[in-house]
């Protein structure tokens, strides 16, 4: 499996490229900014992108999706409960002082239990609201891509529209009950593991 992390944009968001070494099929998770850098990484690795997936639709996670879709033809996937978040992305970006290009509407909606297949790789969708109503994680192949649900030592904020501390508690609990050696690849900051977060994340004390 090929996993590439690119830290992009002024908010230092993690964009992930996950690909199958055998078939060279790939997906892009949370393309927040710097589409040229992302495309260069895809070309260097000889990958063919079949899906662009939003773990949630905040502007810093979706900003490069339009350019990437135009270049790759990949389908954009997200959870239906983030439609409102998606619709507010340009306004949210402006509030933070950034300009967001128009982002194509998602081609398909994915939900709890769905499978996303990339070549020979398979990832299960977990609906993990809290940071946003339609937040998801992608679980499979020894990793879980968590967006802004959980970070090393912390969790996503809940004070944006659609945020809920109670839902975040439930989603966080699901994640830390996964196998402890599972690698967590989050939307900001370094990678971690379920076991480490079970022991060290401050949010454990909030459950």
Image: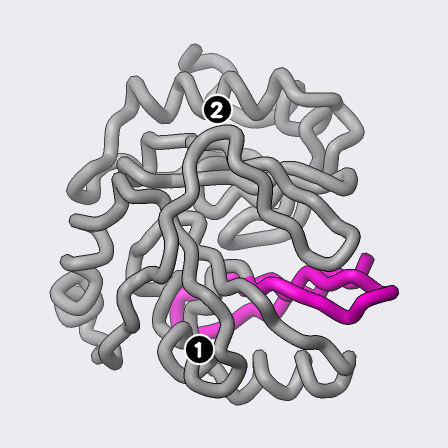
Numbered disc in front, either 1 or 2: 1
As drawn, is 161 to the left or to the right of 17?
Answer: left
Q: Mark 1 and 2 residues: CB-CB less than 8 Å, in contact?
A: no
Q: Residue at x 32, y 54 (%)?
A: 57
Q: Residue at x 74, y 58 (%)?
A: 119
Specify the segment rendered in magenta: 1-28
Q: Residue at x 33, y 31 (%)?
A: 130
Q: Position of residue 70 (x, y in %)?
A: 42, 85
As drawn, is 85 to the left or to the right of 12?
Answer: left
Residue under label 2: 172
What secondary structure predominates along the stretch shown in magenta?
strand
Q: Earlier in the sequence, mark 1 or mark 2?
A: 1
Viewer-proximal residue among 34 and 83: 83
Dot 2 surroundings within 10 Å: few (below 14), some, or many (20 or more)? many
Quarter where residue 39 is shown: bottom right
As drawn, is 124 to the left or to the right of 137?
Answer: right
Report the Cα–Cα distance between label 1 and label 2.
31 Å
Tell me if residue 73 comes above or below residue 186 in the rendering. Answer: below
Q: Residue at x 74, y 33 (%)?
A: 182
Q: Position of residue 146 (x, y in %)?
A: 53, 42
Residue under label 1: 69
Q: Position of residue 188 (x, y in %)?
A: 51, 54
């Amino acid at each position: 499996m090929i996993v590439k992390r690119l830290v992009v944009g002024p908010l230092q968001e993690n964009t992930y490229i996950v690909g199958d070494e055998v078939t060279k099929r790939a997906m892009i998770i949370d393309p927040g900014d710097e589409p040229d850098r992302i495309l260069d990484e895809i070309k260097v690795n000889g990958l063919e992108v079949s899906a662009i997936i939003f773990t949630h639709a905040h502007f810093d996670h979706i900003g490069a999706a339009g350019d990437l879709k135009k270049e790759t033809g990949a389908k954009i996937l997200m959870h239906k409960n983030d439609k409102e978040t998606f619709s507010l992305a340009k306004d949210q970006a402006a509030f933070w002082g950034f300009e967001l290009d128009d982002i194509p509407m998602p081609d398909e909606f994915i939900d709890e239990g769905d499978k996303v297949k990339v070549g020979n790789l398979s990832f299960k969708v977990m609906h993990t609201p809290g940071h946003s109503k339609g937040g998801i994680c992608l679980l499979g192949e020894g990793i879980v891509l968590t967006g802004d649900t959980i970070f090393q030592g912390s969790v996503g904020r809940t004070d944006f529209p659609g945020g809920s501390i109670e839902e975040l508690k439930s989603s966080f609990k699901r994640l830390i009950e996964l196998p402890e050696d599972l690698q967590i690849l989050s939307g900001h900051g370094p990678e971690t593991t379920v076991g480490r977060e079970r022991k060290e994340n401050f949010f454990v004390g909030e459950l």
